[in-house]
Every structure is written in structure tokens, then in C-alpha cells.
Amino acid sequence: MYKFILLFVALACIMPFTSTAQQYMTREGQVQFFSTTPIENIEAKNQQMTALLQADGRFAFRVPVLGFRFEKALMEEHFNENYLESHTCPNGSFEGSIVGFDATLQDGEANDVVAKGTLTIHGIVQEREIPAKIQWNGTGWDIESMFNIAPADHDIDIPKVVRRKIASSIEVTVRANLLPR
């Protein structure tokens, strides 16, 4: 009986360390988008992405819309008030899993993967398969992805007067360094 109690206590002490090592997160991930047209280029950056990766490949991130910074204050105002309506849709998010995730990668090894799940922008949920690269850096995971989003796919209405200034497909880049939680 004494051995059983000792084993139980030892497992209880070890369990918190094993479960925390299986989650990786950041609160400082970067999302950037770029829209190019003959009339004007539009670029914005956000360094407030929160992301979580489980050891089994489940992955999620959330980006506060108000965190995007533009070169011109008027662009930022229009983006928040007229296009993404941040007062009613304050966050963009992705929830799914990383297909091809290999938790046994060695330091410096990278893997091309696909994040498969639901992307929510402007309150519109869409199933997506997003290509990404994931690399073990010795202490955590570096994730980088580049993909396109069409504003029309997320019911983002672009007024005719500025439609020629905003591309119909916007390039999005995501970068994050996820550390053990």
C-alpha cells in the first residue's frame, strides 16, 4: 500500500510538468496584410495575435481588429469603422489543426504543413486550408504562413468610390514564435 501511495504522489508531482510542456503559445504573434492596386498600396501590421498550439497539432489564433496599424490614420479609421466594423466584430480568428505536424522535429528542422480549420473574419466563418511552415527552434515553434483573403468572401463591402484602391484579393502573412506554456 505504501508503494502505491508513493507512486501516486510521484505521478501527481510530475503531471503538471508534462501537461504544460505539451502546449505552446504566444501573445505577440504578427499578422500583416498587403493590398496592391495600380492606384495605391495598402499595408497594415498587427503584433497582438494570440496563438496556441497543442502537441497533437490542434491550433488556434485570435487577432484583435483594432490592433492593425496603418501608414495613414484615415485608412485605419475606415478599416475599423466602415470595412471590418470592429465595434461589432472585434476579432479575427482561426481554429483547427495542423495537418502534417511532427512534434518530434529536431532543433532547426522545418516542415511544410497545412492548417485546416475555420477562419472567421467580419463574423463570417469559412473552412480553409492554409499552407504554412513550422520549425522547431530548440525552445518552441516558429510558424510562418502566407495566404490570400478576398474581402467579398467575408461580406466586407467596399464602396464603389474606393473599390479601385483596394485589391479583390489581399495577401496575408502570419508569423509567430510559440513557447512552452
Image (cartoon, rainbow, N blue to C red):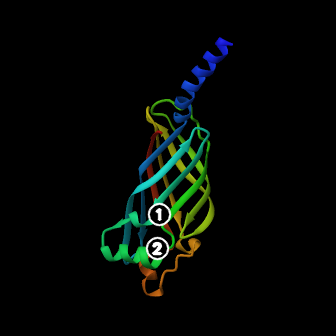
Q: Is residue 167 left or right of residue 115?
A: left
Q: Label 1 sits on what residue type?
A: Glu
Q: Quadrant of residue 40?
A: bottom left
Q: Label 2 sits on what residue type?
A: His
Q: Nearer the viewer, residue 77 or 45?
A: 77
First-in-chain label (2 vs 1)? 2
Q: Which residue is mark 2?
A: 87
**Which type of secondary structure does the marked residue at label 2 adopt?**
loop
Q: What residue occupies the far front of the structure in this picture?
A: 1
Q: Quadrant of residue 14?
A: top right
- Vertical arrangement, residue 148 with respect to residue 101, above or below: below
Image depth: mark 2 or mark 1 in front: 2
Q: Residue 45: percent from the left, percent from the top?
A: 38, 61
Q: Nearer the viewer, residue 47 or 43?
A: 47
The local crowd at label 1, few if under 14, some if 14 to 19, many if 20 or more residues have their Cα within 10 Å, is some
Q: Which residue is mark 1?
A: 171
**Which type of secondary structure does the marked residue at label 1 adopt?**
strand
Identify the disc placed on residue 43: none
